[in-house]
Image (tube, rainbow, N blue to C red):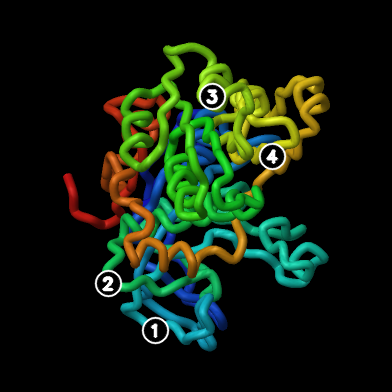
Amino acid sequence: MLSVRLHGPRDLRVEEIPEPDSPGPGEVLLAVRAVGICGSDLHTYRDARIGDTLVQEPLILGHEFAGVVELAGPDAVDGLGQLLRPGIRVAVDPAQPCGRCEMCEDGNPNLCLHLHFCGHPPDNGALRERILVPARTCFPVPDQIDDAAAAMLEPLGVAIHAVNLSRLRVKDSVSIHGAGPIGLLLLQIAKLAGAEPLYVSENLPWRLWLAARLGATPIDQSGGPPAGQIHNKTQGRGVDVAFECGWAGTLVQEAAEAVRYGGRVVLVGIPEDDRLTLKHSTARRKGLTLVVSRRMKHTFPWAMELVERGRVDVQSLISHRYPLARAPEAFALNEKYQNEVVKVIVEVGSGHP
């Protein structure tokens, strides 16, 4: 079957690989339909590592995905407790926690001490025609949600988890630093939670325009430091909660400067150099609460309901679609932020040229 594997920095190759095994107890074989390219995928693509985790052998990327069940093993029970059968369309939670360690038993499977995660070394991901996954990680998708939108449920879950961690309250003011897909999804969740006003800072004009369309007050970085603009708009107070949603770096300091004394800063992005850059005096003098968000937990059913009911718009974020055979081209475009890219979906087996 066809796959796309990373062999080294920016070295993606379209290759034939063996078919997966038949599903065993509690497993399903999926025909992959759609895979989203995530910022963490771009980290791994660019450097053949993410954080301190190295790609040491060819790796199939892709953790935001949806598919259709081709074969189901015995006792293939999905994430809602129902048996899966061939033909059912599903969105997939890429995390496979052990369910037995201290973190899992404390209700934090995203912090599992023995976690396997699709597309994160050493576990292969979804940029291939078929994949074998635990049935419990699958969630049936209603007809109103197409395959591309179903692949967006994972990043939406990440946004929901970050908002939950922030302890956001109705009428809290919010700043979001970075208007990539996570930032734009987080914007919509914070708006639903009653945050007001919502400021979004971004250096790519088309993403800033989209943030404004989705209800944000845009902060154009050409108008001066974003934190200064936010303080001007809040009469010097700052916002209650700031979310860093880019590649960290200077955005962490920017978020800390934008938030009020006693405020909360949630770090969602992953820094390219695996370093947290923040002036201690800023955090200390303001008495800030810093929270680091890792992936998501217990959010898939809620994410699906929000999309199904039209409460969150994921379709407007999808800017580009590529077939599996052109995935290297898709990654190159996404990494360089060309052609007004927001979210790239790889449509597997779509038949597109």
What residue is at 61 percent from the left and 50 percent from the top?
Answer: 168
Q: Are dots 2 and 4 in contact, CB under 8 Å?
A: no
Label 4 sits on residue: 264
Q: Are dots 4 and 3 in contact, CB under 8 Å?
A: no
What residue is at 50 percent from the left and 78 percent from the top?
Answer: 78
Residue 249 can be seen, yes or no: no
Picture coordinates of residue 352 (x, y %)? 18, 49
| Sequence order check, earlier mark of 1 and 3 | 1
Label 1 sits on residue: 85
Label 3 sits on residue: 230
Query: Secondary structure under badge 4?
Result: strand
| Sequence order check, earlier mark of 1 and 4 | 1
| Sequence order check, earlier mark of 2 and 4 | 2
In the image, which is nearer the foreground, mark 4 or mark 3?
A: 3
Label 2 sits on residue: 143
From the viewer's side, name the closer residue of 201 and 23: 201
